[in-house]
Image (cartoon, rainbow, N blue to C red):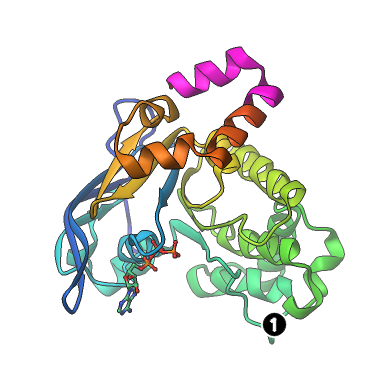
Amino acid sequence: MADLPELRRGAEAPPVIRVRGLVTRFGPQVVHDGLDLDVRPGEVLGVVGGSGTGKSVLLKEILGLMEPAAGRIELLGHDTAALGRSERTALQARTGVLFQNGALFSSMTVAENVMLPLKEHTALPPSLIAEVARVKIAMAGLPPDAGTKHPAQLSGGMIKRAGLARALALDPDILFLDEPTAGLDPIGAAAFDTLIQGLQRSLGLTVFMVTHDLDSLTSICDRIAVLVDRKIRVGTLAQHLADPHPWIHDYFHGPRGRAALDARERTAGPDAALRKAKG
Ligand SMILES: Nc1ncnc2c1ncn2[C@@H]1O[C@H](COP(=O)(O)OP(=O)(O)OP(=O)(O)O)[C@@H](O)[C@H]1O
């Protein structure tokens, strides 16, 4: 693995993701037009926006899975466009991704899926790889016997947790989540949010979470990035609540937004909700 500098943490640390002047086009369709974004180390950033505003495409561009038409993307201090193959592989190993449907290999067991990145990116002996996979499966909140099961034998919530175990396999600095609670019932979604928050705190992860789930946004996100007008506006919940932009206003002040805020206040108490909203 190529040698990459350790991640610095704290207020003075540079952003772990820095996007400048991003332009994304598909034929005549302009999805992003001069988009700028900084993601701070150790924060949970929620990314929202209307359907088709380019949330998933942004995630793929940051991960180097798609190439933007213009702009610069720095991931953990590296200009992703300037990386050689081995540097890119080393950088990928410092990120974990949970795609919306889990993206597990259906022919493999959960344990085999979790072991895959360890086999690809490390020279650990097989017994240790199996042990690390066992630990990650437990960290994702799955019972020990889940490791021997195939994805088809799992519930939707368990598939998400298996995908999360695989995303955590290499002890990433940044965890990317694409709509992690989509398709889960409210109790399952809340449990998944709690799991993400617990892991973020105990592992010091930075979390980049594309979501439509207002409960996730209000309960676990430090800041929220909203894709509007082909750009991004980042702020605390309180800042977005005060933003007169029509889409942002309707989103946060609509019935579902109000319900999520009310639920948060009931759970955490009004003082805690206000502190969080003020950032
Ligand atoms: N490979 C592609 N080729 C052409 N157009 C694409 C491609 N990928 C995405 N698009 C278009 O780019 C726009 C943004 O897509 P993206 O999937 O990022 O939206 P999104 O914000 O994640 O939406 P949703 O919330 O519905 O998942 C859409 O109009 C989509 O049709």
Q: Is 272 covered by the magenta stretch? A: yes
Q: Picture coordinates of residue 93 (x, y %)?
A: 44, 62
Magenta stretch in the rendered image: 265-278
Would you say residue 11 is visible in this rendering? yes
Would you say residue 44 is visible in this rendering? no
Kind of residue indicated by mark 1 = Met
Q: Is mark 1 within 8 Å of ligand 1?
A: no
Q: State whether residue 233 is above or below residue 178.
A: above
Give the crowd class for mark 1: few <14, some 14-19, many >=20 residues within 10 Å.
some
Residue at mark 1: 108
Q: Quadrant of residue 203?
A: top right
Quadrant occupied by the N terminus: bottom left
Name the one closer to the observer, 82 or 2: 82
Farthest residue, direction bottom: 107
Quadrant occupied by the C terminus: top left
Q: Residue at x 35, y 45 (%)?
A: 247
- The dominant secondary structure in magenta is helix
Q: State whether residue 196 is above or below residue 62.
A: above
Q: Picture coordinates of residue 52 (x, y %)?
A: 36, 64
The local secondary structure at tag 1 comes to loop
Q: Picture coordinates of residue 229 (x, y %)?
A: 23, 51
